[in-house]
Amino acid sequence: MKIHVYVTLKKTVLDPQGQAICRALNGMGHKEIKDVRQGKFFEVELADGVAPAAALEQMKQLAEDVLANEVIEEYRVEIAG
């Protein structure tokens, strides 16, 4: 089973890297792009036999403890389709 973990900056936190990406894209002629927020993506593969509900809870805990800084970031955990 694969789990996807998405980590992004909270909306209240400035994202200078996202702003730089947006400016670069606008400079390349993509004027329709208004804003960019960058983040992190993790794809975690679990061993066979792990129950989906247990896997989600385990990965949420891992995201809180290791993958995300909850002061400035938020996360979302999903079972990959």
Image: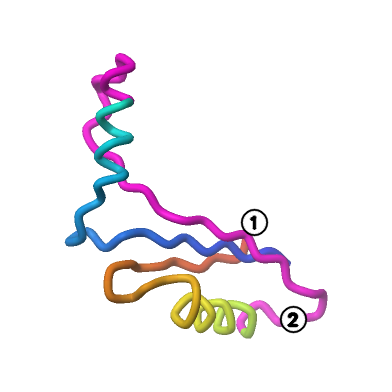
Q: Residues within 10 Å of mark 1 (few under 14, many from 20)?
A: few
Nearer to us of marks 2 and 1 is: 2
| Residue that carries the numbered disc 1 in the rendered image | 81
| Residue 10 picture quarter | bottom left
Is residue 63 a member of the stretch shown in magenta? no
Task: Give me the residue at 52% from left, 56% from top.
Answer: 41
| Residue that carries the numbered disc 2 in the rendered image | 50
Question: What's under tag 1, amino acid-wise?
Answer: Gly
Residue 64 locus on image (x, y percent)? 44, 80
| Residue 57 picture quarter | bottom right
Task: Please determine whether, in this image, residue 31 is positioned above or below residue 43.
Answer: above
> Magenta part of the protein: which range?
25-53
Question: What's under tag 2, amino acid-wise?
Answer: Val
Mark 1: which secondary structure? loop
Residue 59 locus on image (x, y percent)? 57, 77
Residue 34 locus on image (x, y percent)? 22, 32
Nearer the observer, 80 or 27:
27
Kindly identify which numbered label has been placed on residue 56.
none
Is residue 30 a member of the stretch shown in magenta? yes
Task: Please determine whether, in this image, residue 55 is positioned above or below residue 39.
Answer: below
Task: Give me the residue at 27% from left, 19% from top.
Answer: 27
- Quarter in which the N terminus is drawn: bottom right
Which residue in the rendered view is the most extreme toward the top?
A: 29
Nearer the observer, 2 or 73:
73
Task: Give me the residue at 30% from left, 43% from top.
Answer: 18
Residue 44 locus on image (x, y percent)? 65, 65
- Quarter in which the C terminus is drawn: bottom right
Mark 2: which secondary structure? loop
